Image: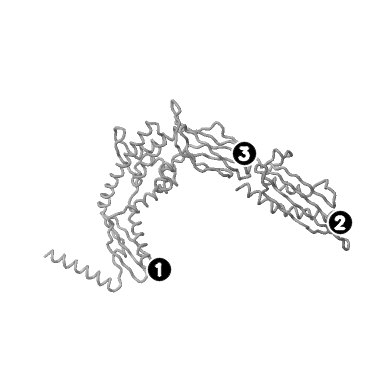
């Protein structure tokens, strides 16, 4: 009798649900979020303002995000917890990346139901917690086995003195473990059971702490637009009782102040040495700095690393060295010949304006042509024109050429012809013409010279 009553009750509930849907009512899971203690439930809704395939997929993604957000990320690793406690921004990014990884790892999710009306599309997903944990545990065992093998290779490389390989192996242990970095992952290493994430983090940090990056000379003189006469030499070695050179260690190289042309990556040689050649300094700043910093990312795969692993690696302090460049301007020799009405001027009119503009851009001037990198030849002349009703007219012309004395090439040439100006005297009219020419030459000359330096 009781079984019959239960069956009738279930049939009645199904009938009422069917009638509700028939007359446009929303299913219970849409109206009220289901509570299923032994399962993760995901509900997703999208408005139907896109093509059907687009809003259906978007609703499914929202439901998957809903499930992923319920998977608690508890930082059980002592080392990782200490790192994230001291770097709040890093902690938020790490949590976000772990959840994104959890979403990507969801398998076996069941589509229980969908519902749509004229405006909305709904998706109901579910996965049993026991099924999720069982799948995850199997994947974790495989990941730990791979990471353990990498850790053993790291130990072997370190003992053999192959430090660059040791860095790579230690760092790569985090790659298979990226979905489990927050957990107390146990493995056998060095004949004992260890927490693998903690052990590898400490091993990497210890090795980095013993690495010395040094140079005999960190302050170098340079000139704008020219290569450095000597390379920026440095060496990497592992500290301890005896300094052990570290070969094949990658470094990123960049201007941290100023700019110029040089390689952006470099490897140490078999003696642990590296040399940075700066082909050209392009910034006019007097003090410029170049940083050589160990490139841990490239030892682990560079841009192919996941956001989770990149976030973890960013917590390490990497060895680096800074070189300071004391930069002076390009040495310029200026030869000017300015005349007015057939007489050489005792005080040039165009030359001072050119020099002032060049000086603002970092160029320096020398009186000995043999000491210069660039030579500027300026010829200017003014002639009298007509005089009309007390207004005198003069015509000014000029030619300027710039030579690169190191290559013996002419790099710039410009002429300005017959600039007509008027005033109450021929001299004043000529001076006005020289002024116009000077401004025109500065406008044309400066961009070309700056461009030449930066090429």
Q: Nearer the viewer, residue 441 or 362?
A: 441
Residue closer to the observer: 12 or 435: 435
Quickly name the residue at label 2: 425
361 above or below 29? above
User: What residue is disc 3 on?
Assistant: 222
- Left or right: where does residue 351 sit relative to residue 1? right
Judging from the image, what secondary structure is the residue with disc 2 in? Answer: loop
Q: Residue furthest right?
A: 390
Question: What residue is drawn where x is 37% and y is 34%?
Answer: 157
Q: CA distance from mark 3 to mark 2?
A: 49 Å
Badge 3 local density, few (<14 within 10 Å), some, or many (20+)? many
Mark drawn on residue 49: 1
Residue at far bottom of view: 23
Q: Residues within 10 Å of mark 1 (few under 14, many from 20)?
A: few
**Residue 71 at what x, y percent from top left?**
32, 51
The x, y position of residue 377, in whole percent, is 74, 47
Disc with the residue nearer the chain's start (3 vs 1): 1
């Amino acid at each position: 009798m009781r079984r019959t009553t239960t069956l009738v009750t279930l049939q009645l509930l199904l009938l009422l649900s069917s009638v509700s849907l028939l007359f446009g009512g929303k299913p219970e899971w849409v109206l009220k979020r289901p509570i299923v203690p032994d399962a993760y439930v995901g509900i997703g809704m999208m408005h139907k303002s896109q093509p059907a395939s687009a809003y259906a997929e978007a609703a499914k993604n929202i439901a998957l995000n809903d499930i992923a957000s319920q998977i608690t990320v508890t930082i059980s690793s002592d080392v990782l917890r200490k790192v994230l406690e001291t770097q709040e921004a890093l902690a938020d990014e790490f949590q976000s990346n772990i959840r994104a990884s959890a979403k990507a790892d969801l398998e076996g999710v069941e589509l229980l139901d969908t519902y749509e009306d004229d405006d909305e599309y709904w998706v109901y997903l579910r996965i049993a917690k026991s099924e999720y944990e069982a799948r995850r545990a199997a994947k974790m065992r495989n990941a730990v086995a791979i990471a353990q093998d990498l850790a053993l290779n790291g130990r072997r490389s370190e003992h053999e003195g192959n430090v660059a390989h040791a860095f790579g192996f230690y760092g790569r242990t985090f790659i298979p473990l990226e979905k489990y970095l927050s957990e107390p992952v146990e493995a056998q290493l060095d004949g004992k059971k260890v927490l693998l994430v903690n052990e590898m983090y400490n091993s990497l940090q210890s090795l980095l702490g013993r690495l010395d990056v040094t140079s005999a000379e960190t302050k170098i003189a340079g000139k704008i637009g020219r290569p450095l006469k000597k390379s920026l030499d440095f060496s990497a070695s592992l500290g301890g009782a005896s300094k052990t050179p570290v070969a094949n260690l990658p470094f990123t190289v960049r201007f941290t102040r100023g700019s110029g042309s040089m390689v952006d990556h470099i490897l140490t040689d078999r003696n642990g040495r590296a040399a940075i050649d700066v082909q050209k300094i392009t910034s006019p700043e007097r003090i410029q700095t170049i940083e050589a910093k160990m490139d841990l990312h490239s030892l682990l795969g560079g841009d192919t690393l996941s956001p989770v692993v990149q976030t973890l690696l960013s917590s390490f302090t990497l060895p680096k060295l800074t070189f300071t460049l004391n930069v002076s301007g390009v040495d310029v020799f200026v030869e000017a010949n300015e005349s007015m009405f057939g007489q050489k001027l005792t005080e040039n009119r165009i030359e001072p304006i050119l020099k002032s503009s060049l000086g603002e851009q970092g160029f320096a001037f020398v009186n000995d042509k043999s000491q210069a990198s660039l030579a500027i030849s300026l010829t200017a002349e003014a002639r009298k024109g007509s005089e009309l009703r007390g207004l005198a007219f003069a015509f000014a012309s000029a030619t300027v050429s710039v030579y690169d004395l190191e290559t013996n090439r002419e790099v710039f040439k410009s002429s300005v012809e017959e600039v007509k100006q008027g005033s109450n005297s021929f001299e004043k009219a000529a001076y006005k013409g020289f002024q116009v020419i000077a401004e025109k030459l500065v406008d044309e000359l400066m961009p070309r010279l700056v461009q030449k330096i930066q090429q």
